[in-house]
């Protein structure tokens, strides 16, 4: 995918409410406007990268882009799981993401347990890949050095280069 790494920022919105409740894996959902403005070469599937909430620390993340076949979604979504434990929900806060790489295409699962196992495998793969030097350097991109306002609904999609 020529568009990787890809950077985007937007307010966290309420999703389907399944991440924490059904899966035990909380996700931060992006608004439709962010999903709709992705480059055409960003296919559906599971990605990994870096995420920062508001102006906080940068953490590893894994993200699903697509239709979530197990749940038979009618609407395409972007759901990021930030690999960090937060004390509370952060709806309305600004999430900045640097999408570094692709793990796998989305696929259907025959059971909830099978889906949960796949997500945990994706998280472990993301952790390993993000320790590689070419991905570690993305944490230093100017994108993450830019202060964001937590009171605006900033939306940004695009590619950056390390400066």
Image (spheres, rainbow, N blue to C red):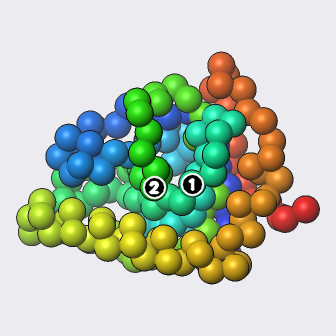
Helix, strand or loop at label 1? It is strand
The kind of secondary structure element at disc 2 is loop
- Of mark 2 and mark 1, the one earlier in the sequence is 1
Count how many numbered circles sit on residues in the image. 2
Q: Quadrant of residue 159?
A: bottom right
User: Can the viewer see residue 3 in this picture?
Assistant: no
Q: Residues within 10 Å of mark 1 (few under 14, many from 20)?
A: some
Residue at the far left in the pictured view: 111
Residue 62 falls in image quadrant: bottom left
Question: Residue 86 at what x, y percent from top left?
Answer: 44, 39
Q: Which mark is residue 59?
A: 1
Q: Is residue 151 left or right of residue 122?
A: right
116 with respect to 127 (left or right)? left
Q: Residue at x 30, y 65 (%)?
A: 119
* Residue 54 horizontal side relative to residue 89, left or right: right
| CA distance for labels 2 and 1 | 6 Å
Q: Nearer the viewer, residue 119 or 86?
A: 86
Q: Quadrant of the N terminus?
A: bottom right
On screen, residue 131 above or below 39: below
**Is residue 31 toward the left or the right of residue 152 in the image?**
left
Dot 2 crowding, Cα within 10 Å, few <14, some 14–19, many 20+: some
The quadrant holding residue 29 is: top left
Circles 2 and 1 in contact, beta carbons < 8 Å: yes
Farthest residue, direction right: 163
Q: Quadrant of the C terminus?
A: bottom right
Residue in the foreground of this view, choosing between 54 and 109: 54
Name which residue lies at 47% across and 71% down: 126
Residue under numbered circle 2: 83
Residue, x 42% and y 52% (percent of image)? 81
The answer to whether residue 94 is seen in the rendering is yes
């Amino acid at each position: 995918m020529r568009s990787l790494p890809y950077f985007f920022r937007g307010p966290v919105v309420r999703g389907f409410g399944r991440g924490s409740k059904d899966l035990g894996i909380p996700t931060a959902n992006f608004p439709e406007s962010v999903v709709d403005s992705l480059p055409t070469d960003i296919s559906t599937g599971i990605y990994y990268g870096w995420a920062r909430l508001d102006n906080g620390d940068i953490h590893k993340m894994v993200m699903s882009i697509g239709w979530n076949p197990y749940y038979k979604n009618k609407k395409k979504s972007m759901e990021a799981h930030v690999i960090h434990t937060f004390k509370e929900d952060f709806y309305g806060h600004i999430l900045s993401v640097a999408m570094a790489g692709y793990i796998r295409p989305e696929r259907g699962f025959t059971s909830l347990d099978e889906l949960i196992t796949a997500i945990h495998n994706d998280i472990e793969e993301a952790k390993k890949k993000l320790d590689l030097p070419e991905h570690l350097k993305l944490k230093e991109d100017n994108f993450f050095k830019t202060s964001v306002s937590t009171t605006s609904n900033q939306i940004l999609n695009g590619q950056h280069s390390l400066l």
